[in-house]
Image (cartoon, rainbow, N blue to C red):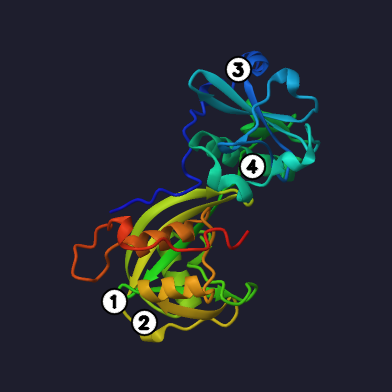
Amino acid sequence: MKILNLPLARATIDRSAHLRGDQATLDALWKTSTIVHFNGDGFLVDSGSNGVALKRLTAEEVTVTGERIFLGNHDGISYFALCSPAFIGEQDLYKTLRTISAGLSDLDIGLAVHTQAIAHWHHKNSFCPVCGLNLYPALGGSVRRCANEHEQYPRTDPAIIVLIKDNKDRILVGRQAVWPENRFSTFAGFVEAGESFEQAVVREVFEESGVQVSDINYLGSQPWPFPQSMMIAFEATITDPENARPDGEEIVEIRWYDRETLYADAISGQLLLPPSVSVARAMIDSWYQSTGHDGHDGHESDDSLRKPLPGAETWR
């Protein structure tokens, strides 16, 4: 089984959870730490000749107040996020995660994904659901706690995303009603209460495309902090491609693609592919570069055998 190298799942930082309960240690670390700033929409970045990176700040350079989130340690350096709607420096140096993610290092991806996910959670959870008192950050920002010691933890919503294939190794993609013409992607949906990932795959595939799943393979997972999801990726083989049809509500158009036709439509503009930051694009790219049912062994081919698919950033 090949696990995909997903673009937002490249974190290298040690979260060092054992330090979160020692406020005195966190206060001391803050004074010598590296700090990144998130203003609720974007990150302060440092744009240079080598691409885009998160701007590194010292405690002395932080000129605004906000919530401090302890992110962890990497190579002997402690990292914090400062979450504040104010700006530090020029406004045009703040960029959204969707915009910069493709160019960030593994370290910066981990810092940014963690920061954005937890910052949005803090912003939306001001009051205790048990007693109604104000909630405040605790344990380095990893929880929120009220005066009655009730603790609330960050919420993550699991969602499955599926690459549907038939026995000819074609893939099925769909267009949502709210998307523009020619924008297609793989199928996805949230896992419902009391439902396993596999059950969600079978249900979503049938609901959105009308086909029955026969085999399921796990491909990987990545956080999707827009605002608080976890995408769990699968490929599913179906045996009744003739039954494929859009549900007419969420999905209004479907297409079957082999590799040659997909490339041709992407080049001509008849197909707008998902952006490079997405799980959907990683799944499609992996399938496209694999040998498929052409007499070979089904393993990944040399990338030089097929031209790369265009339009990695078409959904920006």
Q: Is residue 243 above or below residue 234?
A: below
- Give the image quarter of residue 111: top right
Instruction: Please name whichever residue, 188 or 263, is drawn nearer the observer in this view of the structure.
Output: 263
Mark 3–mark 2 distance (CA, rounded to whole Å)? 57 Å
Q: Which residue is mark 3?
A: 22
**Label 2: how many residues lie within 10 Å, few (<14), some (14-19) or many (20+)?**
many
Of labels 2 and 1, the one closer to you: 1
Mark 3–mark 4 distance (CA, rounded to whole Å)? 23 Å
- Give the image quarter of residue 46: top right
> Is residue 132 among what the camera can see?
no
What residue is rendered at 57% in x and 58% in y?
313
Q: Are marks 2 and 1 in contact (CB under 8 Å)?
A: yes
What is the secondary structure assignment of the residue under circle 4? helix
Mark 2–mark 1 distance (CA, rounded to whole Å)? 10 Å
Instruction: Please tell me which of labels 4 and 2 falls first in the chain.
Output: 4
What is the secondary structure assignment of the residue under circle 3? loop
Looking at the picture, which amino acid does disc 3 mark?
A: Asp
What residue is rendered at 51% in x and 33% in y?
107
Looking at the picture, which amino acid does disc 4 mark?
A: Gln
Looking at the picture, which amino acid does disc 1 mark?
A: Lys
Q: Which residue is mark 1?
A: 168
Q: Which residue is mark 4?
A: 116
Point out residue 303 in the picture as x, y percentages from the top left corner: 33, 56
What is the secondary structure assignment of the residue under circle 1? loop
Of labels 1 and 4, the one closer to you: 1
Point out residue 108 in the picture as x, y percentages from the top left corner: 55, 36
In this view, the residue farthest toward the front is 49
What is the secondary structure assignment of the residue under circle 2? helix
What residue is rendered at 44% in x and 57% in y?
282
Q: Quadrant of the N terminus?
A: bottom left
